[in-house]
């Protein structure tokens, strides 16, 4: 009986796009919940490393720590602030991309998606520049180990996100998604926002604290 | 121009543009219902907060001891 009664939302979608898939409509929320649980699990992964870093830092006698009798340098806040804005900007463009898709504007969707990918690659190049000029290594100190582990893990997420967005773009242009069926794009947008938000925490912990 | 000054100017201007845009996106999303909309609101809000952090860093209010 429950399946016989269409939800108001489903009726609205059907009226607008005429390509509604009932199976999709019924399973979308379950898949979305699964994806949100995936993001929460990823959040826990980052949290465990972040709390390790906080513990190591607060229990250290001096910060930045000393290596061979010399205190290590702080990280470059100016460059990190600029690079952060590149990543946050990509979150905004990704949101615009999804909104363009919802409004059935494929040209603008492609434009915003490409902008997101370019900004994501720009952030990764910025991180590569940071790694080459930071003046510390992975080994030797808890500062270096924490920094490279956390930012490296985040960078891996950004890289996977860029690949994910490229695949989504290809799928969208091959007709995999329609005006009412675009769960992949929603998931991609949530993932990208998640990656942005993780960077907010890392930016504060390594560059501002 | 010193590279650090240039980076802070870009961060300052970018933080305003991106932060204001994210806030408007959050405002537009505010009345939308559903799990994806709720998660998006949370993430957009935190992203706007990140822009505030970048803005404060660009004017030496935060992270100044790192210089």
Image (cartoon, coloured by chain):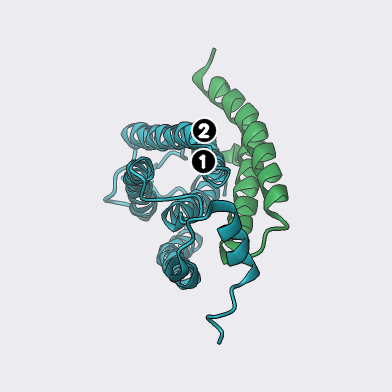
Tell me the green chain: B
Residue A180, can we see it?
yes
Q: Provide residue A93's location: percent of width, then percent of height.
A: 53, 38
Residue position for label 1: A97
Gap in angstroms between the C-alphas marked 1 and 2: 7 Å
Question: Which numbered tag is attached to residue A108?
Answer: 2
A153 displayed left or right of B8: left
| Of labels 1 and 2, the one closer to you | 2
The front one of A102 and A202 is A102
The reply to whether the C-beta atoms of the residues labelled 1 and 2 are less than 8 Å apart is: yes
A88 displayed left or right of B48: left
Query: Reading the chain from its start, which is encountered first: label 1 or label 2?
Result: 1
The front one of A39 and A138 is A39
**Element type at mark 1:** helix
Tell me the cyan chain: A
Q: Provide residue A172's location: percent of width, then percent of height.
A: 38, 44
Q: Provide residue B5's location: percent of width, then percent of height.
A: 57, 21
Write the residue at 41% across / 64% down: A42
The front one of B65 and A4 is A4
Write the residue at 56% across / 61% down: B36
Question: Which numbered tag is attached to residue B10?
Answer: none
Q: Could you tell me which quadrant the N terminus of chain A lies in? A: bottom right
């Amino acid at each position: 009986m429950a399946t016989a009664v269409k939800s108001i939302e489903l009726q609205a979608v059907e009226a607008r796009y005429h390509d509604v898939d009932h199976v999709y409509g019924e399973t979308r929320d379950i898949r979305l919940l699964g994806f949100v649980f995936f993001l929460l699990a990823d959040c826990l992964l980052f949290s465990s490393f972040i709390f390790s870093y906080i513990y190591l830092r607060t229990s250290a006698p001096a910060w930045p720590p000393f290596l061979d009798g010399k205190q290590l340098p702080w990280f470059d806040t100016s460059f990190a602030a600029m690079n952060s804005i590149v990543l946050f900007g990509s979150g905004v463009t990704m949101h615009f991309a999804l909104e363009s898709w919802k409004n059935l504007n494929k040209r603008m969707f492609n434009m915003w998606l490409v902008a997101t990918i370019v900004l994501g690659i720009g952030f990764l190049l910025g991180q590569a520049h940071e790694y080459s000029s930071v003046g510390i290594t992975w080994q030797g100190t808890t500062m270096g180990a924490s920094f490279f582990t956390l930012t490296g893990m985040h960078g891996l997420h950004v890289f996977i996100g860029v690949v994910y967005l490229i695949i989504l773009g290809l799928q969208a242009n091959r007709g995999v998604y329609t005006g009412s069926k675009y769960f992949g794009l929603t998931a991609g947008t949530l993932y990208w926002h998640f990656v942005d938000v993780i960077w907010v925490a890392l930016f504060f912990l390594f560059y501002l604290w | 121009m010193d590279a650090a000054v240039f980076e802070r100017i870009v961060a300052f201007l970018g933080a305003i543009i991106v932060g204001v845009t994210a806030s408007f996106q959050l405002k537009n999303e505010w009345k939308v219902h559903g799990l994806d909309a709720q998660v998006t609101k949370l993430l957009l809000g935190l992203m706007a907060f990140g822009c505030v952090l970048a803005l404060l860093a660009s004017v030496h209010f935060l992270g100044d001891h790192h210089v």
